[in-house]
Image: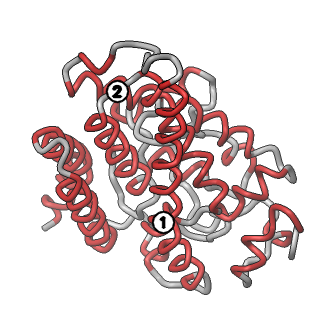
Amino acid sequence: MEILKQGIRYFGFPILFFSSSAILIGYAGNIWIAYSVLSVSILTGMILERLIPFEKIWNKSDSDSKSDLFFLALQPIVAPITGTALAGIVHRLMSFSGGQTATNANGLSLWFQVLIGMFFSGFVPYWIHRFSHARDGFLWRVHSIHHSPGRLYWMNAFRAHPINTILTTGGALLPSLLLGLHADAVLIVGMLNNFVSIYNHMNIDFRLGFLNRIFNMNELHRWHHSKIPAEGNNNYSSGALAFWDILFGSYYLPKRKMDANLVGLFEPDKFPSKSILKQILYPVCKCS
């Protein structure tokens, strides 16, 4: 069993990611297959959280489970509406220019379009995320919901204010639309970005080695959830790739293990952790 666990630690993520990528590209355009792949991946991750947890204590339920469930239900509503609305707006605006896009990327092979989409989809969310860490500003109050839990596990990925979801979803999608990527490529890019964004919050003891320079996975992202500003104000990349952190100097991966008790907000006393309504209103009223 220990040999199996070690194998999963080192090879589990690349096997899951690249097999999911192959299925998504092989069945391009089938939205039911796409969502099935993502759903099975999440269920697999939930099992791995129990099999090879990074911190066993993070698998224990705490007082914020009600909030987690609320935001878990909200995300699948807000994100698709945002994507559909933005696609409609961009299509409408492009119709005035004869349907011309920034490039003729639609004519490229599907896998190459996916690579292009994954690369550019992280740029705008990176800067939204980085600006959101200007403490006590509007964007930080929007983003602070995501940092409020004191542990990391799969549901943390869905814990975001609707405004945060609108900004990051729109920011990730816009480059693909402007570049004129095929709808199949846009869907696959979204699924792979979601795959990594969910897995990098999971309480799984993955050990990626050199792949941490490529993928924005949990060995990197858990440091972003540190209560210590010098640690938490790093690793802003959103989606699958860590490239933008490397480019803009915010890549942070120390060799030591993260302290399980140092996850959460920099100033938790200011945040209305016990009221979902106050959390939603927090960006405009600073309810506490």
The amino acid beneath tag 1 is Ile
Label for residue 181? 2
- Going from the N terminus, do you reach mark 2 or mark 1 first? 1
- Residue sitting nearer the eye, 267 or 138: 138
At x 32%, y 17%, the residue is 105
The quarter of the rendered structure image containing the C terminus is bottom right
Q: CA distance from mark 2 to mark 1?
A: 24 Å
Secondary structure beneath dot 1 equals helix
Quadrant hosting residue 65: bottom right
Q: Camera-side residue: 116 or 207?
A: 116
Q: Out of 200 and 204, give the one closest to the viewer.
A: 200
Residue linked to disc 1: 77
**Residue 60 locus on image (x, y percent):** 47, 82
**Residue extending farthest top:** 103
**Total tally of numbered discs in the picture:** 2
**Left-right relation of 88 to 271:** left
Residue type at the position of mark 2:
Leu
| The quadrant where residue 145 appears | bottom right
